[in-house]
Image (spheres, helix red, strand yellow):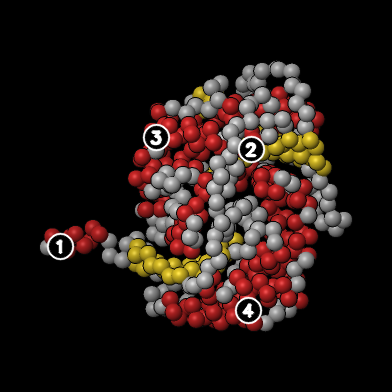
């Protein structure tokens, strides 16, 4: 996965420099009509400027004006992620993300990247459960050129055998380096969902089985593009030092003539209610110590119980004062750290399907799974049998608001465009960003108790151990002797 590299831009003071290219063609904006939605906000909550438009080809456009930093953040989100890839082609969504970085008809090879870098900006992208994104942060005077470039990539990407072979090798190397040759590998973010879920779309190796990656054909890549990479399945977000009217004209001009695309393939990603606890063991010759992870299936996103689970997440595993950390690290000394959360590949807002609330730890070999889970159950059963106090609820809500503001208020504005894109893709309502706190405001101790009783029951839990194992090479050497 292309890992974010934008942290260095928190203090972006990029000079107003030339964009290093002749830029986009000076076409007249076409006359596509748009529907417009303006977001509101609670009087006492966050207030983000949001305008929302839909082009005739189905492309959703979100604009957010903010002149505090002289940069613009552009993001193009496609509603395709790990869940959408076809059976027998695990890792294909991630592979295709790489393919889209190979350039476009008017910007072949590395010219797309050079356009960004010569402008003084950065770009990246990623594949997640329910979307693939591409984004850039550039000085605001380079915005028009970047919109033209993204439109060219959407309309005319380079998808050929040479690019496929090249990027298949790149992704294969990523799998080897990041998973197969790493201690603990994809234990908590790949293997645990595969244990917990029943539906293949939620329960497969989305980083990619090597045999599936090698079997990917050029026809598969073209079909995947035709199915998912179209304006009707995409959102363009532009946030920052922009003129909204001029920006919308550019988006209409460059994206408006791209065909809407085919109707999306129908995929059922629903999960049955889990009725019994699941267990799994991963032998790992690279692991120096045992590890343990457990996950509970989440309530549907956006429901009252979803917000209550976010509160439980804060109480149980987030921060030094969390109940599981106090029990497992401070009191029992099983481990030096407990980590976890909702949607480990993103945040609690940017997914749209079945999800786990997950907890993990690496622990000493003298402590068994049964011993550790007995202590875990002591904590879990407390929140399942007793209402949390008003003080605990208030503390959890304060931490949630702090996390939310931290996502939105970054120097790159990437957290902001991420949420705007997710709410447009999944809810057709990017102004929901200004109402997120309303959901948390409705959480009560009674709701937290009822949610814990249903979703933190043992029969909704999956437990995965990592057990250090002798390496195959060591076994072969012993056999040779």
Which quadrant of the rendered structure holds the C terminus? bottom left
**Image quadrant where residue 327 sits:** bottom right
Q: Are marks 2 and 3 in contact (CB under 8 Å)?
A: no
Q: Earlier in the sequence, mark 2 or mark 3?
A: 3
> Separation of disc 1 and disc 3 at Cα?
40 Å
Q: Which residue is mark 1?
A: 479
**Image quadrant where residue 353 sits:** bottom right
- Mark 3 residue crowding within 10 angstroms, few (<14) / some (14–19) / many (20+): few
Q: Is residue 250 left or right of residue 4?
A: right
Closer mark to the observer between disc 1 and disc 3: 3
Q: Earlier in the sequence, mark 1 or mark 3?
A: 3
Q: Give the tally of numbered discs.
A: 4
Q: Residue at x 21, y 62 (%)?
A: 475
Q: Earlier in the sequence, mark 3 or mark 4?
A: 3
Q: Residue at x 65, y 21 (%)?
A: 23
Closer mark to the observer between disc 2 and disc 1: 2
Q: Is residue 169 left or right of residue 436?
A: left
Q: Earlier in the sequence, mark 2 or mark 4?
A: 2
- Residue 437 lies, in percent from the top left, at 77, 59
Q: Which residue is mark 3?
A: 217
Q: Are marks 2 and 4 in contact (CB under 8 Å)?
A: no
Can residue 63 be seen by looking at this rendering? no
- Mark 2 residue crowding within 10 angstroms, few (<14) / some (14–19) / many (20+): many
Q: Which residue is mark 4?
A: 384
Q: Which residue is mark 2?
A: 234
């Amino acid at each position: 996965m292309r890992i974010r590299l934008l942290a260095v831009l928190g203090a972006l003071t990029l000079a107003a420099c030339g964009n290093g290219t002749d830029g986009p063609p000076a076409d007249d904006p076409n006359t596509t009509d748009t529907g417009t939605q303006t977001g509101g906000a609670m009087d006492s909550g966050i207030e983000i400027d949001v305008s929302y438009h839909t082009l005739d080809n189905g492309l959703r456009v979100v604009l957010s004006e903010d002149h505090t930093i002289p940069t613009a953040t552009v993001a193009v989100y496609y509603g395709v992620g790990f869940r959408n890839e076809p059976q027998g082609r695990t890792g294909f969504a991630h592979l295709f993300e790489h393919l889209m970085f190979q350039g476009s008809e008017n910007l072949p090879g590395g010219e797309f990247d050079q356009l960004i870098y010569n402008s003084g900006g950065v770009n990246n992208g990623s594949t997640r459960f329910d979307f693939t994104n591409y984004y850039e942060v550039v000085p605001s005077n380079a915005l028009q050129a970047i919109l033209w470039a993204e439109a060219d990539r959407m309309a005319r990407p380079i998808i050929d055998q040479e690019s496929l072979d090249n990027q298949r090798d790149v992704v294969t190397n990523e799998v080897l380096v990041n998973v197969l040759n790493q201690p603990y590998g994809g234990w908590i973010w790949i293997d645990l969902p595969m244990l917990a879920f029943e539906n293949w779309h939620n329960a497969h190796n989305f980083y990619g089985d090597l045999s599936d990656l090698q079997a990917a054909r050029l026809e598969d890549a073209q079909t995947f593009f035709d199915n998912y990479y179209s304006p009707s399945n995409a959102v363009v977000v532009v946030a920052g030092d922009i003129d909204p009217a001029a920006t919308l004209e550019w988006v209409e001009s460059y994206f408006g003539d791209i065909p809407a695309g085919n109707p999306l393939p129908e995929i059922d990603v629903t999960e049955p209610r889990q009725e019994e606890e699941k267990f799994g063991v991963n032998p790992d010759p690279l692991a120096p110590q045992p590890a343990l992870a457990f996950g509970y299936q989440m309530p549907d996103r956006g429901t009252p119980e979803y917000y209550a689970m976010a509160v439980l997440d804060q109480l149980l595993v987030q921060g030094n004062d969390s109940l599981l950390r106090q029990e497992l690290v401070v009191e029992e000394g099983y481990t030096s750290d407990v980590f976890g959360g909702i949607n480990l590949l993103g945040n609690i807002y940017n997914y749209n399907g079945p999800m786990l609330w997950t907890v993990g730890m690496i622990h000493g070999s003298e402590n068994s799974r049964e011993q550790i889970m007995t202590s875990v159950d002591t904590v879990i059963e407390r929140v399942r049998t007793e209402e949390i106090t008003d003080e605990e609820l208030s503390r959890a809500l304060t931490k949630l608001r702090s996390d939310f503001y931290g996502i939105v208020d970054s120097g790159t504005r990437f957290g902001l465009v991420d949420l705007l894109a997710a709410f447009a893709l999944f809810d057709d309502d990017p102004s929901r960003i200004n109402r997120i706190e309303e959901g948390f405001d409705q959480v009560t101790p009674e709701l937290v108790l009822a949610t814990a009783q249903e979703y933190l029951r043992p029969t909704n839990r999956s437990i995965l151990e990592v057990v250090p194992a002798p390496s195959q090479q060591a076994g072969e050497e012993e056999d040779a002797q």
